[in-house]
Amino acid sequence: MDSIMYVLIALVVCVVIFAKMALVIIPQSETKIIERLGRYYATLNPGINIIIPFIDRAKSIVVLQARRYMYSNTIDLREQVYDFPKQNVITKDNVQTEINALLYFQIVDPFKAVYEINNLPNAIEKLTQTTLRNIIGELELDQTLTSRDTINTKLRAVLDDATNKWGIKVNRVELQDITPPESVLTAMEKQMQAERNKRATILTSEGKKQSEILQSEGEKMATINRAEAAKQQAILHAEGEAEARIRKAEAEAIAIEKITEAVGKSTNPANYLLAQKYIQMLEQVAEGDKTKTVYLPYEATNLMGSIGGIKDLFKD
């Protein structure tokens, strides 16, 4: 009885072990490749799966963990990121630069990822390095530092096309660090400083030039305005004098008409005006300095004639 009991217990234990080995639980976003007697049999889906122990076994795949290559029989279908170590690349203008790249990829076909490539992480890393060298080799240092988006786009397109046969989808590539040599950094810093000084000098000279232009324009406008004002003043002054002369002439004409009407048509008005002027002159002479001697002109014939005219005028 004891031996039978031991046999039954052993059978139960074997059945439990066999059942445990036959039942395979796959977490979400993971899978396993099952080989039966060395040949591909199935790709397990998330959930409970049944296999035949000792006949079916999971195919191992190389994974990268903590920068170390390890074997695992579980394939992760989520997006993964590889942080590759810095590598030296040479630009088109022969400058050696260190570049660190980040690669985001996802396994979309586990069968190809297992059977089409031996060491998937190492293959992706080497392919990324060689492709990056080719792309950087076509660019100069300045273009490399300012064209990260262009480099990322080109690198992702090449890697996605090359890894398609491995069942890999490359979602994006990011250049994390671009580190030129120390001598180049020093030269770039001096160049940037010189460029800043140049821009400052240009801006200062442009400001001074603009200030002088505005000042000269202001002086020009002021001179023009002063000239226009003087011109208008002269015109108005001349117009005023002309208007005054015209008014004076009109007044004299009216006065002559009035005098003509007063003295009558038989008497010449010119004699009246001449007499009036003569009397005003005599008044001025009388009011002047009494010690002065008044000389009459040598030719006083016209003056005597005028006096005779005045006499006739008063006689009339």
Image: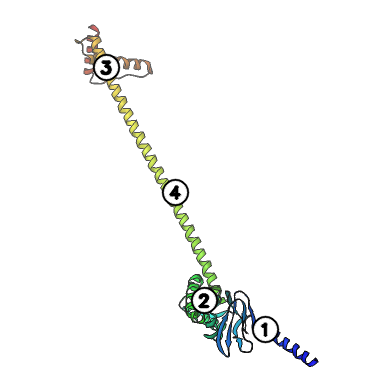
Query: What amino acid is found at the position of numbered circle 4 in the picture?
Result: Gln
Q: Going 71% across and 88% down the picture, which residue do you hit?
A: 14
Tell me which label, 1 or 3, sits earlier in the chain.
Answer: 1
| Residue on which the image places disc 3 | 254
Residue occupied by mark 1: 19
Quadrant hosting residue 77: bottom right
Q: Residue at x 52, y 76 (%)?
A: 169
Does 210 appear above or below 13?
A: above
Near-viewer residue (200 or 70): 70
Residue 215's label in the rendered image is 4
Q: Residue at x 70, y 86 (%)?
A: 15
SS class of the residue under badge 1? helix
Q: Which mark is residue 169?
A: 2
Q: Nearer the viewer, residue 230 or 115?
A: 115
Q: Residue furthest right?
A: 2
Frontmost of labels 3 and 4 is: 4
Mark 4 or 2 closer to N-term? 2
Label 2 neighbourhood size at 10 Å, few (<14), some (14-19), many (20+)?
Answer: many
Mark whose residue sits in front, 1 or 3: 1
Cβ atoms at labels 4 and 2 below 8 Å apart: no
Badge nearest the viewer, 3 or 2: 2
Nearest-to-viewer mark from 1 and 2 = 1
Of the residues under marks 3 and 4, which one precedes in the sequence? 4
Q: Position of residue 294 (x, y in %)?
A: 32, 19
* Inter-mark Cα distance, 1 to 4: 99 Å
Marks 1 and 2 sit apart, C-alpha to C-alpha, by: 37 Å
Amino acid on which disc 3 is placed:
Ile
206 or 164: nearer the viewer: 164
Quarter of the C terminus within the rendering? top left
Q: Secondary structure at mark 2?
A: strand
Give the x, y percent position of residue 109: 53, 79
Horizontally, is 235 left or right of 207 in the view?
A: left
